[in-house]
Amino acid sequence: MLMTIFDKSFIHSINAEEAAVFDMHFMSNMTPLFFVEVLADLEKSDMPDDEARQRLVSTLAGKTPSMRCYSNVPHDEIAMGELLGFPVDIRGVPVIRGGRRVQSPEGLGTVYEKSPESLAAERWHKGQFGEEEYRSARHWRAFLAHAPQSIEEFVGASPARFSFKDLATVKRFAESIIDRSGARHKTLRAALDMFNVSLADRPQVISRWKEAGGPPLADFAPYTRHVMLVEFFRTFAMASGHIDPDKSSNFADMAYLYYLPFCQAFISGDKLHRRVVPLFLRDDQQFAWAHDLRAHLAELATTYLADPALSDLGLIGVSSRTRLDKDSYIGAMFERAYPGQAEHE
């Protein structure tokens, strides 16, 4: 079973039956950006009717995975913790908030409380929208309407001065800027500024970095470096015209890339994601075009709903008996992630 990250375009593209099948075969990492996009729908300027906006959000919530779903901690919290000395697992699993140890008759275990995002999704599914949701929606709409702070000071020149052949060239240039061997201390300080590390905590970070021999940021804080790379890439790509800086949704779409280290497959029907995401994936990760995936989900939904055992076994039971052919779309996804291992769901 694959750990996936998806954007709103994917949930928009599938129907309820296809969403249920997706939930049977995949695990989901719910990034804060997905909730940002959904929350923004509560404040859609082109949809003045409150009830219509609420119906739209409720529909999205109803199709959002819930069985094997995990809410990822915001990227800035993860990066700040990493700089302070808390390692980050970037091998394709979600970063979720710490649980609490509990003793039960069966033994010692860990309980994870539901995150605010998960609780919000439950409320939306029931059609319940409070002032908290609207306040968050207004906050995120304001955030998406403004570009992040410039990196001009770090680069030493206006990003607009540079031109690039293509997006791959932009990425290589951004990597060369961040990984300059003679600017390791400057890069670290830029990271401290980017993630608003407090003045009280900065000496601890710098001291830890010096004790480690002043390594490149990629070795000292690899996840922090990843987020910085996304930001540098976005800035140069927009300044050079490869990504439209006047389309506010592009900022949210690019921010999804902060969470790429925490999945095995990224699913989207967004053209910008189709151009950009593959540039940032590891060899053991993959990009799935939402419209291609949906076609196979539709085939499976038709098969499952026609199964005579559906009434007795339910969708979980029917899907668990299915062996996905490695030549099928989803089967091929599993085969790429786990070569040579038969996939039973």
Image (cartoon, helix red, strand yellow):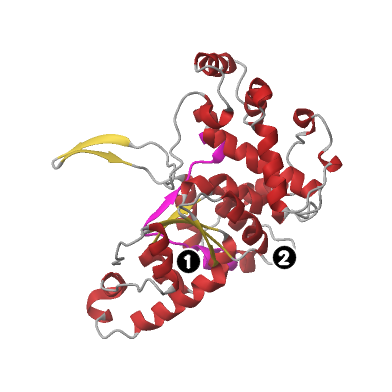
Q: Amino acid at mark 2?
A: Pro
Q: Is residue 42 visible?
A: no
Q: Report the side of 188 relative to 119 (left or right).
A: right
Q: Quadrant of residue 108?
A: top left
Residue density around tag 2, few if under 14, some if 14–19, many if 20 or more, within 10 Å: few
Q: Report the side of 288 relative to 65 (left or right).
A: right
Q: Amino acid at mark 1?
A: Gly
Residue matched to label 2: 48
Q: Where in the figure is residue 318, as x and y percent of width and height?
A: 28, 75
Helix, strand or loop at label 2? It is: loop
Residue density around tag 1, few if under 14, some if 14–19, many if 20 or more, within 10 Å: many
* 249 lies above or below 91: below
* 213 lies above or below 172: above
Image quarter in which the N terminus is found: bottom left
- Mark 2 or 1: the one toward you: 1
As rendered, which of 60 and 3 lies closer to the eye? 3
Region rendered in magenta:
54-78
Q: Is residue 74 visible?
A: yes
Q: Which label was assigned to residue 62?
A: 1
Marks counted in the figure total: 2
CA gap, disc 2 and disc 1: 22 Å
Mark found first going from the N terminus, 2 or 1: 2
- Residue at the outermost left position: 105
Q: Where in the figure is residue 117, as x and y percent of width and height?
A: 49, 49
Q: Where in the figure is residue 118, as x and y percent of width and height?
A: 45, 51
Q: Residue at x 53, y 66 (%)?
A: 11
